């Protein structure tokens, strides 16, 4: 069997934790920030986790992580 290629776009966006959860950055922090409140922008800095429904999909993109 040949090796499976990792999707490099997914590798840049997600990291797998020791417990197997997948960390991600929150969306909406790149542009059009002047209409968003300070509180919103501050909360966007904190990361999040991929939902359990989507974990299976993301793990297929990252076969060796």
Image (cartoon, rainbow, N blue to C red):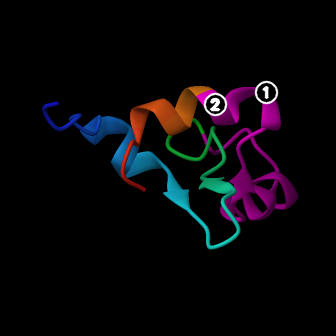
Tell me the element at label 2: helix
- In this rendering, would 59 be left or right of 21? left
Q: Position of residue 9 (x, y in %)?
A: 31, 37
The answer to which image quadrant residue 33 occupies is: top right
Find disc 1 in the rendering and name its residue: 53
Q: Position of residue 36 (x, y in %)?
A: 76, 43
Q: Residue at x 59, y 47 (%)?
A: 29
Q: Is 17 inside the magenta-drawn segment?
A: no
Find disc 2 in the rendering and name its residue: 56
Judge the density around disc 2: few (<14), some (14-19), many (≥20) Cα neighbours within 10 Å. Answer: few
Placement of the N terminus among the 4 image quadrants: top left
Magenta extent: 33-56
The answer to which image quadrant residue 55 occupies is: top right
Q: Position of residue 54 (x, y in %)?
A: 69, 28
Q: Residue at x 62, y 73 (%)?
A: 18
Tell me the element at label 1: helix
- In this rendering, would 52 be left or right of 63? right
Out of 33 and 50, give the one closest to the viewer.
Answer: 50
Judge the density around disc 1: few (<14), some (14-19), many (≥20) Cα neighbours within 10 Å. Answer: few
Q: Residue at x 69, y 57 (%)?
A: 21
Placement of the C terminus among the 4 image quadrants: bottom left
The answer to which image quadrant residue 61 occupies is: top left
Q: Which residue of the protein is positioned furthest toward the left in this rendering?
A: 2
Q: Position of residue 38 (x, y in %)?
A: 80, 60
Out of 8 and 3, give the one closest to the viewer.
Answer: 3
Out of 19 and 35, give the one closest to the viewer.
Answer: 19
> Is 30 rendered above or below residue 18?
above
- In this rendering, would 7 be left or right of 27? left
């Amino acid at each position: 069997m040949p090796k499976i290629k990792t999707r490099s776009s997914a590798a840049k966006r997600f990291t797998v934790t020791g417990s197997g959860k997948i960390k991600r950055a929150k969306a909406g922090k790149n542009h059009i920030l002047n209409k968003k409140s300070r509180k919103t922008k501050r909360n966007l800095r904190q990361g999040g986790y991929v939902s359990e429904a989507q974990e299976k999909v993301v793990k297929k993109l990252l076969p060796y992580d």
